[in-house]
Amino acid sequence: MSSSELVDKIRQQYELEPYPNFPIDRSAKKERSYLPFHNLVTSYYIRNQKVTNSEGKVILDAGCGSGYKALILAEANPGAKIVGVDLSQKSIEMARERLKYHKFENFEFHVMPLEELPSLELEFDYINNDEVLYLLPEPIAGLKAMKSVLKPDGIIRTNLHNTYQRAAFFRAQEFCKQLGLMDGNPDDFEVGILQETMDALKNGVNLKQISWSPQIKQNPRRSLMNHLLQGDKGYTIPDMFALLEAAGLEFIDLLNPRQWDVTQLFQTPEDLPTFWAMSVPGLTVEEKLHLYELLHPVHRLIDFWCGHPDWAQLSTPVTEWSNQDWQTAKVHLHPQLKTDSVKEAMGEGMKQIVSVEISRYLLIPGLSDIWIDSSTIACLLPLWDESQSMANMVQRWHQLRPVDSMTLEPISRELAFETVRDILSTMVEFGYVLVER
């Protein structure tokens, strides 16, 4: 099958089954697991340790499908213009309808392949390319097309299907091809044959066991995005780095790096076997991530940010900052937390002297059930009004906690500084607070 024939099959597939098939009226305002990393502030800070603003930015959703991620991008980035492109006319129509329904006005959508992006004559601050790259006949061409319309300091978020985690579905796709179910564009007839086949097989048959999940059994049309998915391909971590090098792009980070930490696969990460304790510090990022996927291939997507080479500003982790660095720091709350409802919940926690589950409002991949006590809330509360200098936060803390509650001795300004620094360091590590020098 030629590349053009495959692309046409993929287009027809999404004409029949726009993705994601969410109702138009579904809101994105409470998508706590999506909004943080769709807010361009997050990736800009990870790369440069600087806080930017979404106002006036131009964001591309490359392969926008039915527009739900475009809606999330609009919600997460107030004041930004959203541009979406997709192969499927039906998907584009749904995307337009979706953003209009939710009262957004600064957007435009176009039916076109990624390779034609330069014809838009636009440059983008951020490009979201979700669940697309692994379907392209030539993913390098797709990366190069996005790079060609990316501003010099812009960032691309994209992802690839994981070869090892997805292995059962690649086998299932080959099985369906052998049955002729993917000669045309699969629909209810092909889904019916696959369902009948799986139901008739013994429960111990390996492919049925590992690919025909209860969710798919309950809704067999989900097989269209799995067993019967046209153009689906798998990649490894080395493949990802090779694609980026070929496209002239630089790896920034994974969206969920905590969930790819190979040391956390050991029973006692703080006390690794001697060989590992000696080896891990000298490994490259690529080597560490590849070891993880070989040991524990549980992530369906290799989900990452990348950008033009040499635009990352070398920065020191806040855990290694000197006191002088902290003295001149400016402290920001993550924009996704800056809502009246979150501020009210925090204020209530402080008044009642109880802990509040902050992860309820902003969920960082790899973190859950994160609670902050009333003292931490008291330290952070001014950030809901505006960004603060470190000096102002220390002064306020000193006023709130002038004496040691155990000894009733006065607390020194130096101790107040150290306390605020330690609180902020933890909050920066979790991604709830952003500090810049």
Image (cartoon, grey):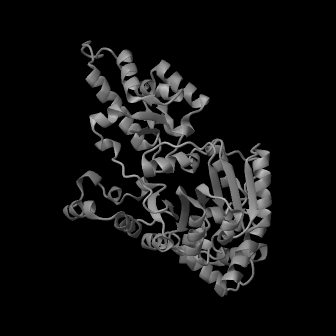
Q: Quadrant of the N terminus?
A: bottom right
Given residues 366 and 158, the one toward you in this image is 158
* Residue drawn at x 66%, y 67% as measured from the top left: 118
Give the number of callouts.
0
Q: Is residue 51 above or below residue 3?
A: above
Quick check: 153 left or right of 177? Answer: left
Where residue 161 appears, x then y in whole percent? 54, 69
Q: Position of residue 135 (x, y in %)?
A: 62, 73
Q: Residue shown at 73%/54% (left/top)?
A: 22
Image-quadrant location for residue 411: top left
In the image, residue 105 above or below residue 205: above
Left or right: 248, with 321 as reference point? right
| Above-or-below relation of 431 to 139 | above
Rendered residue at 77%/47% (across/down)? 25
Q: Is residue 24 visible?
A: no
For the C terminus, give its image quadrant.
top left
Q: Is residue 6 visible?
A: yes
Closer to the camera in the image, 55 or 422:
55
- Image point (27%, 24%), residue name: 415
The x, y position of residue 240, in whole percent, is 47, 70
> Residue 24: percent from the left, percent from the top?
77, 51
